Image (tube, coloured by chain):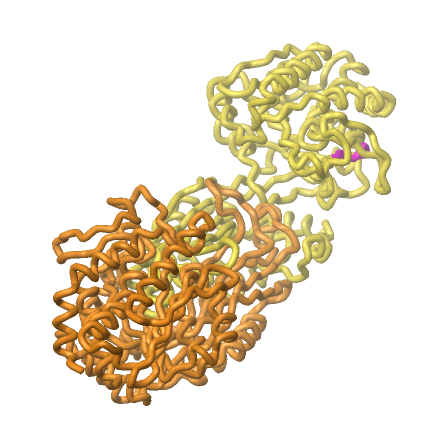
Chain colours: A yellow, B orange
Amino acid sequence: MSLDAVLNRIDDDLAAATDRLLDLLRIPSISTDPTFKNDCQTAADWLVADLQSLGIEASKRPTAGHPMVVGHIDGPGPHVLFYGHYDVQPVDPLELWDRDPFDPQIEDTAKGRVIRGRGSSDDKGQLMTFVEACRAWKAVNGTLPCKITFIFEGEEESGSPSLVPFMKENAEELKSDIALICDTGLFQSKSPAIVTMLRGLLGEEVTITGPSKDLHSGMYGGIAMNPIRVLSRIIAGLHDDQGRITVPGFYDGVPELTPEIAEQWQGLGFDHAGFLGDVGLSVPAGEQDRSPLEMIWSRPTCEVNGIKGGYTGEGFKTVLPSKVSAKISFRLVGTQDPLTIRESFRGWVTSKLPADCSAEFHSYGASAASTMSTDHPAFEAARTALSDEWPATAAYVGCGGSIPIAGHFKKILGTDAMLIGFGKDDDQIHSPNEKYDLESFHKGIRSWARVLAALT
Amino acid sequence: MSLDAVLNRIDDDLAAATDRLLDLLRIPSISTDPTFKNDCQTAADWLVADLQSLGIEASKRPTAGHPMVVGHIDGPGPHVLFYGHYDVQPVDPLELWDRDPFDPQIEDTAKGRVIRGRGSSDDKGQLMTFVEACRAWKAVNGTLPCKITFIFEGEEESGSPSLVPFMKENAEELKSDIALICDTGLFQSKSPAIVTMLRGLLGEEVTITGPSKDLHSGMYGGIAMNPIRVLSRIIAGLHDDQGRITVPGFYDGVPELTPEIAEQWQGLGFDHAGFLGDVGLSVPAGEQDRSPLEMIWSRPTCEVNGIKGGYTGEGFKTVLPSKVSAKISFRLVGTQDPLTIRESFRGWVTSKLPADCSAEFHSYGASAASTMSTDHPAFEAARTALSDEWPATAAYVGCGGSIPIAGHFKKILGTDAMLIGFGKDDDQIHSPNEKYDLESFHKGIRSWARVLAALT
C-alpha cells in the first residue's frame, strides 16, 4: 500500500468527488417531514449504489422509520465501523436562503470555496469524506486497508428512534474493534480534534403551584404566596456566588483533568474572548476558578432553558398566578449519576418550598456523560495521522453537547468510538445557507486516508 | 319627611322594583363588543325614561363611545352626585351558563333568593338600588331629600375611555358636595362597608438580555450568562425574608393606620383563614409583622404577574436564551409616588445586573393610591345609616384593587367619593351565572334611603 499515491489520487479526483457529493445533496432527505419519506429512500438507494460501486456488499435495511444503509467489506487491518447519517434538517425559513437548499453549488467566498446546500456539512459532506477516502484507496490499491462496516442512518435529525433497536437486533453484525463517527468539527475551525468527552444531560421540568387558581393581584396581592417569587428564589439559589451548583452531592463523580489532557487543552490556545464575543458576551460565567475550556467541556452545568408563568401576552394583566414552570437541564461529566442527581435536585427544590406551595416534576431524560478511553492504540494513531494532514497538532477535546450515538456504540456494541470531523463553526448547520468548506471536504478525505493507513 | 314610610314603601314595592330591574337586565348592553352597540343605546334610553318618570330632568349624552346618561333633580339637602354603569361584561363562555344570561329570573337557592343574569350585580342591580330608593322617596314625600345629579356610564367594562373627557367637558355641571358610587361589595358578604382606601398601581415590564442570540446550551452552557438566572436573582431579591420589599425608598409615604381605623378593622373579624382557604392557601405571605387586612388593604405590594423566557412549548429544547421578561406590578398606598418608585425600581434592577447583561423597561401605567378623607360629615352620617340597616356595624374599609373612577371624581371635580355597595363575594361578576342576592337588592335600596335621609 502507498499512502502518498492514495493522497495524490484524492487530489486528482476532487472535482469528481465534489460532483458526487452535489448529486447526493440534491436529494431532499428531510427526515422529520413525512412529505420527504420517498426522498429518504432515494438517498439510501444512492448510498447503497455508491458503496456497491466500490465492491462493498451494501443494502438498504428496513426499520420502523427511514431505512439504514449497511455495508461490509473485508480487509487486512482491524475491523472498523463507520457511522454517518444521510438525513438532513428542514430548510425553514426558506426565504432566508440565498439559493434553493437542494440545488447545491460550489461558491467562491471571501473565506475560500464552499459547497453550499442543505446537508453539505451535516452530515452528507462529512459522511462522503470517508467514502471518498475508501474510493481512492480502492482505486490505488485494489483493496481496502481494514475490514470496514458502514452504517448510515436516516433519522439522526429526528432523534434516531430506530437506531438503538437496529443496533440491538444486529449487534453481532455491527461489532467491530473501533467505531468512527464523522459528525463533529475542527476545533475553532482550524485544529483537527478527536472528541473524547461528551457531556451527559439531565432534563427536568419543575412546576410550582401556590394558590389553587389564578387570583386578582388587587384582591390577593400581598397576602397570597406568588409561585413566581418561589421559583425565582429556587433558581437564584441553584448557583452560588462563585458559579458552583448548590444541589447536594452534585459534584460527586466530577473528575479533574489528567495532566496530559490539561496540557493539550492549554496548547489549543482557545480564544474564549472571540467565542464569547461572537454572541455579545465577554466574561466567562461558569465556575470562577475554572478555565473557559473546562466550563464548556469538562465541568457540569445547570441551565434554565425556559420559564413561563402568569400573563405573558401583550399588555398587562394583574394576575397572581397559580402556577409557574421552568425547564432546567444539567450537563453532566465524568461519572456523575443522572438518577442520583435527579433525586437530589428534586429533594433540594422541595426543601426550599414555603408553606402552601407544592412542586411537580417531569423528567425529560437522563443520560450520563461519555468519556472515551484513549487507551485503544487507534486513538494515538489517528491523532498522529490528523496532525500530519493539518497545520495544527490534533488534540483530544471535549464536546459540551451530548451525542448519544457514541454512548450507544459503547453500551450496545461494547465498542469505543472516535469522533473525528471537519465542520467549521460558520457552517450554519440546521440554519439557512448551510455550507461545507471545500477545504474541509478535501482535507477531510485526505485525513481519513491517513487515519485508515495509521490503523493498519 | 318620614324615613319609616319610605322604608315601608320600599318593602311594599319590592316585586315591582325587581320587575323593573329584570327589564333592564334583558338589554344585552355589552360595551366591548360592537355587535351590541345599539343595545347600549337602548339601555341608556331605558334609564333616561326611568329617571324622567321620577320627575328627573334626564338625557342621553353622546360621547366618542357609548352614551352617558345624565340627570338632575333639585332638593333641599346637599348636592349629591351618584355614579353607576349600565354596560355589562361579555358572557363567554356561554356554555357555562345555566340559563340565557339576558333572560334573567328570580331563583330560589340554598342561600336564599337571587336575581340571576348578566349585570344583575355588576352594575345594573347596584345602580337600581339607588334609583329605587329615590323612587320610594318621591312616592312618599313628593320630592327628593337632596339635590341629586345622576351619571350612568356605558363603558366601565371596557376601560371608561370617554369618562375623563366627559367629566372634563362638563365639570361645572357635575360638581357636587359628595359623590356616591355603587359598584363595590359588602365586607365578607355580610358587613356594610364604605371603601376609603384604594391602592394605586405601578406596572412595569423588565426584559433582561444576556447573549445577543439564543444559544445551544451544549455549546455555551456554563460559559455564557443565562438571563433567566439573572432575572431570577433580581426577582428573588425583591422581597426580604420578612416579606418586605427591598427597592430603596419604597416605603416612603406609606402611612400607619389611624387608631380609629385600626379599631374598626379589628372589629370586622376578618376570616383570613377562610379567605386564604378558598384559594388553597393557609399562611399570609406578606410582611410578617402586619395583619392580614393590612396586607390586602393598607400595605404596598410587589407581585410578578407574568414571566417568560426560553423554550416554553411541549417537550424540551436545550436553548440558552438571549432574553427573558417579567411583568411586575406594585400596589401603592398612602402618598407613595409611583414615578419615584418606578425610577428607584429601574435603578435597583440595573444595579443588580452582572457583566454582559442589560435591562430594558416598559411602563404599563403608574397611578397613586386614593385615600378618601372621611372628614366630610357625609361619611359618618352614611356609616351610621348603614349600621342601622344591617345586622353588623358599618366600617371604613380598604380595597386592594384600583377603582380609577374614585380618583377621577377627586382630581377632575374636586369631590370626595363614598364607595358603598352591596355585592357579595359569590356574585360571580364577570363570570357565568352572575347573580345578585334579593337581600342585596332589597336592603341596598333601604340602605340608600337611610343614607339620603342621613345626608339631609
Question: Which of the 4 image quadrants contains residue A377?
Answer: top right
Q: Is residue B248 left or right of residue A433?
A: left
Q: Is A271 or B419 nearer to us in this picture?
A: B419
Q: Is residue A313 left or right of residue A212?
A: right
Residue B258 position, x and y percent, is: 30, 88
Residue at 27% in and 58% down: B120
Q: Nearer the viewer, residue B44 or B277?
A: B44
The secondary structure that most of the magenta stretch takes on is strand
Q: What residue range appears in magenta?
A: A435-439
Residue under the point 28% across and 84% down: B379
Measured as percent of width and height from the top left, residue A183 is found at: 65, 33
Q: Is residue B215 magenta?
A: no
Could you tell me if residue B313 is visible in this image?
Answer: yes
B93 left or right of A438 in image: left
Depth check: give the residue in front, B228 or A344: B228
Residue B197 makes an appearance in the image: no
Question: Where is residue B402 drawn, in percent x and y?
Answer: 40, 70
Is B266 positioned to the left or the right of B235 in the image? left
Q: Residue at x 26, y 89 (%)?
A: B259
